[in-house]
Image: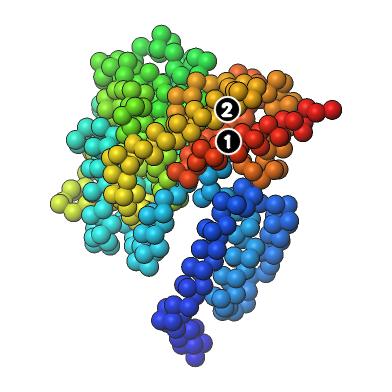
Amino acid sequence: MMTDTFQKKMFQEMERKEIFNQAQNYAFEYADNACERTVFPTDESIANLENFTEDLPNSVGETVEILKQLHKYGSPATTSQIGGRYFGFVCGGVLPVALAVRWLADFWDQNSALYVMSPIASKLEEVVESWLRELLGLPNQTVAGFVSGSSLATFCGLAAARYRVLQNNHWDINKQGLNNAPKIRIVAGRQAHATVAKAVALLGFGTDNVEWVDTDSQGKIVLSQVPKLDKSTIVTLQTGHVNSGAFDPIDEICDRAINANAWVHIDGAFGLWAASSKKLRHLTKGIEKANSWSVDGHKTLNTPYDSGIVMCSDQDALSHALQASGSYLAYNENRDGMLYTLEMSRRARVIELWASLKYLGKTGVDQLVFGLHQKAVQMSRELSAEGFHILNDVVFNQVLVACDTNEVTNLTMHHIQKSGECWVGGTKWDDKAAIRVSVCSWATTEEDITRSVRAFVAARDSVTEP
Ligand SMILES: *Cc1c(COP(=O)(O)O)cnc(C)c1O
């Protein structure tokens, strides 16, 4: 019977382990090569992706061949995230310990929705939740939901806010919905991350209704422009502007929000980790006064994708908002992870977070986070010495770079990308073209920075030389 041979084949694969050895060999080959290869795939590697354009197979295939194809054509078409010279977006490298535990945990294939589905995932979520509270200095009652990234974490935080603010206005959003609901005010900086606007739209507030607050030359909210807050207001602040890395004046705004009984959510995707570094902690002063926070594991902390965390000091609001199921919730001694996330079935992504935090410890996290800052400062210093303009105050890990004209900036960026020496993306800053450098990986060395600066210079020379 077909089913039998099909099963037999898979049992054999599990038993013989050859395919896993094959995968491991490929992975090691990839890793050994990661620091030397071009940071962005070559044109040829990209052209070879056509290899994947094929009809869905009719019948059961061969794992060996599938792995071979993936390695041969897939590996060269990756961006080198695990090397030290990928500075695009805000991405983050990957800690070896996190990769290793992930391999083990992949064999477990746990669903972390409920305690009864995975006692180990439940336990580690509980442990990491308390470690995060301590590391970031958040209130004791703060709970954490382990989600795919900050996009979802911000959505969850604002959903909790919506639940609580409406509840305070005698309205049950879960039962009564948005029609005729008391009006909620949303206050956000003009330069809030796009995912804030996304959450605002999805939650039915409408981006046109946001009271956008003016920002300064670094993208920070200007304190004097913050409108009067009240108990119907949700304020979103950010620690770490996606371009400049700037931090909003958290402390002062939180004080006002507390007095007004407004809710504050902090989008701290990459920057919230500053709170775990002695020398950078001043940037996040007052974060403990907010009500909810979003932060990524996969950026600054260098866990593998995908790993985001929503934290909320109002457990009831978070779990009611995400359960949307009225009042049957019972908290028992065993943690059910799905109470704090939108999803029910979910991979046990907490495992890599747990391992990363356990491995680094408090001083290791500090070293990692502060190290990223130091490399960013080095980058800005060396680029500046080479005549590039640094457009932002390098308070964290982001550096905004420009040449003398927009055209030269854009062409220089293009040439850097083509060189494969490092990868940087572009943005607009103050209506000027800018190259955006995000130092995000533990693997970035001082030599990587210097080598990347050389790539900047070579690219600019090739653009400007007659
Ligand atoms: C990256 C980022 C996000 C989105 O996070 P994802 O993990 O990509 O969903 C939100 N806010 C800021 C400031 C970011 O840098």
Residue 200 sits in quarter: top left
Whole-percent x, y for residue 411 in the image? 73, 32
Numbered disc 1: secondary structure: helix
Give the quarter of the figure containing the C terminus.
top right
- Judge whether 196 appears above or below 230 on screen: below
For this orientation, the residue located farthest to the left is 333
Whole-percent x, y for residue 142 in the image? 24, 37
Residue 428 sits in quarter: top right
Whole-percent x, y for residue 88 in the image? 57, 39
Residue 413 sits in quarter: top right
Residue 367 versus residue 306: which sits nearer the camera? 367
- Judge whether 56 appears above or below 99 on screen: below
Are dots 1 and 2 in contact, CB under 8 Å? Answer: yes
To which residue does mark 2 refer?
382
Q: Quick check: can you spot residue 325?
A: no
Q: Which mark is residue 450?
A: 1
Q: Residue at x 57, y 27 (%)?
A: 382
**Badge 1 residue CB within 8 Å of ligand 1:** no
Q: Amino acid at mark 1?
A: Thr
Q: Quick check: can you spot residue 29?
A: yes
For this orientation, the residue located farthest to the bottom is 1
Q: CA distance from mark 1 to mark 2?
A: 7 Å
Q: Residue at x 50, y 41 (%)?
A: 445
For this orientation, the residue located farthest to the top is 224
Numbered disc 2: secondary structure: helix
Which comes before the other along the chain, label 1 or label 2? 2
- Left or right of 209 on screen, residue 321: left
User: Mark 2 Cα within 10 Å, few/some/many (few <14, many 20+)?
Assistant: some
Q: Amino acid at mark 2?
A: Glu
Q: Residue at x 36, y 38 (%)?
A: 367
- Left or right of 95 on screen, residue 426: right
